[in-house]
Amino acid sequence: MTLKRNVAAIAVAGILVGSAASALTVSAISPSWQNVNPTNGVTESSSGSTISLRWGGGNNPSGYDFTPSGTPILNLSPNSAFELGQFTHLNFPIPGETLSSVDLVVDIQIGGGPLVSSTFALTHNETLNRPQNCPQDPTPCDDIVTIANTLGSQNFTLGGQNYVFSVLGFSQDGGGTISSGFKTVEELQNYATLYGEYTVAPVPLPAAGWLLLGGIGGLFAFGRRQKSKTA
């Protein structure tokens, strides 16, 4: 009886360890632009870790910058939003071509684990600065940056534990409010921070139950064999 109780305790402990929250490390964040639309009149560049788009011509073009957060990011706890990088929209009056859409791809290297890639299908609304185009805002009109696709989540495994990584969206108030888009004020550089999080996937109950029963049954059979030998 004591033997079976010990086996049960060991099996339950194994289940709890497998589902325990584990801190992770992000060792690198690498962004890139893809599917720039239109292809004419929009230029790409980079400076250090920052990637940039510019359009509209003139002395003060409009554009996007994205600067990934510095790495490594250590001891990330599950269910806690963390910063992936800073997104900037340089919103200035322009005479030329306007960006319509672009994909921002963010590759996240999990320390000791896999590369997790997320794509943001961004649509850009370069509003005309006329009262009829933005009756809810003062003129000049705010521009609007929107994540058009469903962000979803990705599963990965590290050290035998299953995790789910999710990109949450943009925040302009330090993570207090996170959304899929934001307005940007004319003639300013407008900032938003991109946030993500991970969760620990629970151990499926049927698998845990069979593990527990299998452990108890196996050791119980072993105990009966030992008794038979000594009888």
Image (cartoon, helix red, strand yellow):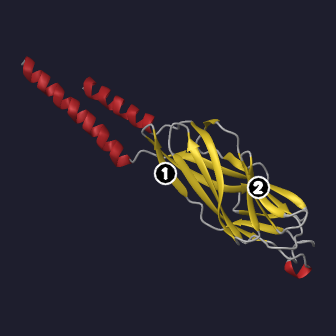
Q: Residue furthest right?
A: 139
* Residue drawn at point x = 89 percent, y = 62 percent: 60
Contact (CB < 8 A) between labels 2 and 1? no
Q: Which amino acid does label 1 sit on?
A: Asn
Q: In this view, does 231 lie to the left or right of 177?
A: left
In x, y percent, where is residue 143?
82, 68
Please give the residue where the numbered disc 2 appears in the rendered image. Answer: 65
Q: Nearer the viewer, residue 231 or 50?
A: 50
Secondary structure beneath disc 1?
strand
Q: Nearer the viewer, residue 54 or 77?
A: 54
Please give the residue where the numbered disc 1 appears in the rendered image. Answer: 155
Viewer-nearest of discs 2 and 1: 2
| Whether residue 177 is visible | no
Q: Residue furthest bottom?
A: 132
Q: Is residue 226 left or right of residue 121?
A: left
Q: Which residue lies furthest to the top in this view?
A: 230
* Residue drawn at point x = 73 percent, y = 63 percent: 181
Compared to 75, does 136 lie above or below?
Answer: below
> How many numbered marks appear?
2
Q: Nearer the viewer, residue 127 or 179?
A: 127
In x, y percent, where is residue 202?
46, 46
The quadrant in which the C terminus is found is: top left
| Whether residue 15 is visible | yes
Q: What residue type is labelled 2?
A: Asp
Q: Which of marks 2 and 1 is nearer the N terminus?
A: 2
Secondary structure beneath disc 2?
strand
